[in-house]
Amino acid sequence: MLVVSLIVFSAVRLIPGDAVDIMFQAEAGSSEQRDVLRQRLGLDRPWYVQYGSWLGGILTGNFGASLRTGMDVGGEIFRAFPVTLELVMLGTIIGSALGIVLGIVAATNRGRWLDWLIQPVGLVGLSIPNFWLGSLMLLAAGLYFPQLHVVGFVPFSEDPLRNLSVMILPSLALGLTLGSAVMRMTRTSVLEVMSQDFVRTARAKGMLEPSVLWRHILRNSLIPVITVITIQIGVLIGGSIVLERVFALPGLGRLLVTAIGERDYPMVQGITLLITFIFVMINLLTDILYRVLDPRVKLG
Amino acid sequence: MKRGTSMKFNKRLLVCAAICSALTAGSASAQEMCHGGTLSAGYIADAVGLDPHLSTALNSELMFQFVYSGLLKTDNTMAVQPDLAEHWDISEDGLAYTFHLRDGVEFHNGREMTADDVVYSFERIISAGGAFSARFSDVESIEAVDDLTVTFTLSRPFAPFLSVLATTKSAIVPKEAVEEHGDLQTHMVGTGPFKFVEYRPGTSLILERNEDYYDETRPYLDRMEINVIPDEISRITGLRTGELDFIQVTDPLSLQLVESDSGIKTDVVSLLRRNLMVLNVNQAPLDNELVRQAITVGIDRQEVVSLALGGSGEPSGPFPSGLAAWALPLDEVPFYNDAPDIEQAKALLAEAGYSDEFTITTYAAPQYASHIPVAEVLQQQLARIGITLNIEVIEWGVLLDHWRNNTFETITMTYAGRSDPYFYTFERLHSSSPGNASRVSDAEIDRLSEEGMTISNPEDRREIYNALQVRMAEVGALVYIATETEQFAMQSNVNGYVGMPSGGRNYLAEVWLEDSCK
């Protein structure tokens, strides 16, 4: 994480364009006047001092103040994070559920019309960029479901119904891409396991088909699926950045994009650091999940 | 849309119902007495901090402007009007400005506003640093003569001073609110027509009627909700489903889409902001005045309007036409003909010794919708006079870097418009101004723009600026192209909205809803 923090810190400063110059836009403003502002923001200090004070702040839970608004970066992230988290979680749930169910249906109906129907849908789902899908959904919702709220995000804790009504479309748009990937993986994996000897043995000893599917096939075919899901969560976080803009959700992605455009260094650093941390945590979680699904995998 | 149900609201409704039913008989002015209702607006971008003195973004102004008042304000013709100052005197030498404040104005926290608050607010503006503070660099002292009188003393005459005071950033704030919250970035206390209720960053700003506003009949609305919806389709969907009453529309095609809806009306506002090409006079071949004149005369401004600006906008000379009191008609400005003069352009290039084709590069950024399309049309047009325009698309922050450091050949961009000619002349072209991106240094421009800044007699000033506009066209460091427009769409019951050439939303505070009367 220390290395990451240094990379993040230098990367945002390597982008050409200067925070103070962007604040002045294309307005007059002498170099003295710009220096006054630079001094007020602490950008006149040497980089290692800035890095040191930023790192020191983080260790005590202080992410610094936004260059643009002077507001606490930690507070802003804290407010935006739950929105992105909810979006990614709903997207993951929708995507995994859809993908696994359709994948099993396709696999057990291999070669029949259901399989032929599901497969191309999966391909299309993978190929369509989710922001475009999101825009289409919005247009359709405006025409056919005017009762769905498309604006005015409220936190889940305040008005769960309205919150879900706002979140349903972006979650669907996000989940469909994941669903397609999961579906394809599930289908392949289930087919592979189905052709193995222990499945034939299970059937031969007279087990009922549902229980063969549930106890033997699924359990053994889910490990690659879990891998796909966790890898795709990274893609989902990326996708949510664009979708948050399309659906006007006040999440991390929107905060990050705005901050980059304005060279709001502390804000970009804080968000990037948090996202890196989440990635590391997800990888850890994946390893733990493997063990739950397959007791043969040892921890450590 | 939520409706207020307080006792106060009901009482007003009753009064209104009585008056309105008495006066309805087809009279629109009778309906203007309608109070009540909530306006739900859809903005493209969120504020970048709400503090009028610390925030630098126009998007912030579009939100905090309803909560604050200044000494002066501008109307939709960009003329200065009294606000918290009822009247003012300017000393003979143009150095002392004395303002007489309105009596009995209260901040939203209930405390009466006095001259001390004015002094405090302007000291805060000056110490903030930034482009706006720089406009006060000639202020020597600010003094509260008594509770209702304030005097500003300048170190040299500065004719555009009133127009600086009339911008929304010259807001009067109470000291105790700043001290309580540290700054006013997330909390607002002013003297304006609306009071702050709640701000959810990235989502919405909620305001309610200031019952103690100094103008007793205003505002008409009970509540205003400003929603931040960056995506155009979302805004339009919100308007069509009735969740929103007022939205900004950026794409002319989307405007046509909503225009066909019944119950929705649209408004196109002509802005002072205009597209222009900034030429670097330090780089050959643009160091040659004749080459710059050839570009100026060879461009078809009307074609740029129809091809790149969706047909809305107007060809612009040195001053935008919206600056009506000052702008010369284009036929009185050299090189700004109605139609492009290809022959003259080629002759000028030949005279300059550039009869062969040559290439220049322009930077443009996708930050604003018009910049790249305008550059593309210019590319076609300049090809006709033998200049190959090479468009390089770069990020806005990088572009500003080049702009400030004079490391470019040309930049295709927009300059914001303001209400006084000073901002188009001294700030943009005086050899000492940091806003002079072309780095032009012309003795006549310097002399005239200094005179225009210090002489406040309107007649003399007009003559100075007439001569200056001609000289600006001859020098040609900035090639002005066309003004921009802003488009709005609203429910048909939204009345009283007038667009501002400055891009401000001042008149949203004046809006009344037709059906809130029934």
Image (tube, coloured by chain):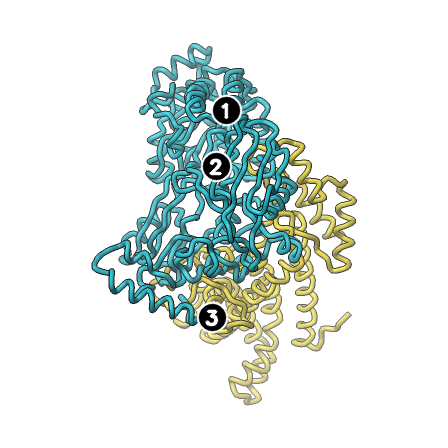
Give the SS element for disc 2: loop
* Above or below for B406 versus B236: above
Relative to B223, B450 lies left or right: right
Relative to B463, A24 lies left or right: right
C-alpha span from label 3 to label 2? 39 Å
Q: Nearer the viewer, residue B502 or A45?
A: B502
Residue at image point 55% right, 58% down: B201
Tell which subunit mark 1 falls on: B
Q: Which residue is mark 2?
A: B416
Percent x, y for residue A260? 60, 47
Residue at image point 44% right, 43% down: B503
* Above or below for B424 versus A236: above
Q: Which residue is mark 3?
A: A162
Q: Which chain is cyan?
A: B
- Give the farthest residue toward the left: B25
The verdict on a common chain for dots 1 and 3 is no
Q: Earlier in the sequence, mark 1 or mark 2?
A: 2
Percent x, y for residue B221? 40, 59
Tell which subunit mark 2 falls on: B
> Callout 2, which amino acid?
Ala
The verdict on a common chain for dots 3 and 2 is no
Return the mark for residue B94. Answer: none
Q: Which residue is mark 1?
A: B455
Q: Which chain is yellow?
A: A
Q: Nearer the viewer, residue B454 or B255?
A: B454
- Give the farthest residue toward the bottom: A206
- Tell me the crowding category of disc 1: few under 14, some 14 to 19, or many 20 or more residues within 10 angstroms, Cα based: some
Mark 1 or 3: in front is 1
Give the SS element for disc 1: loop
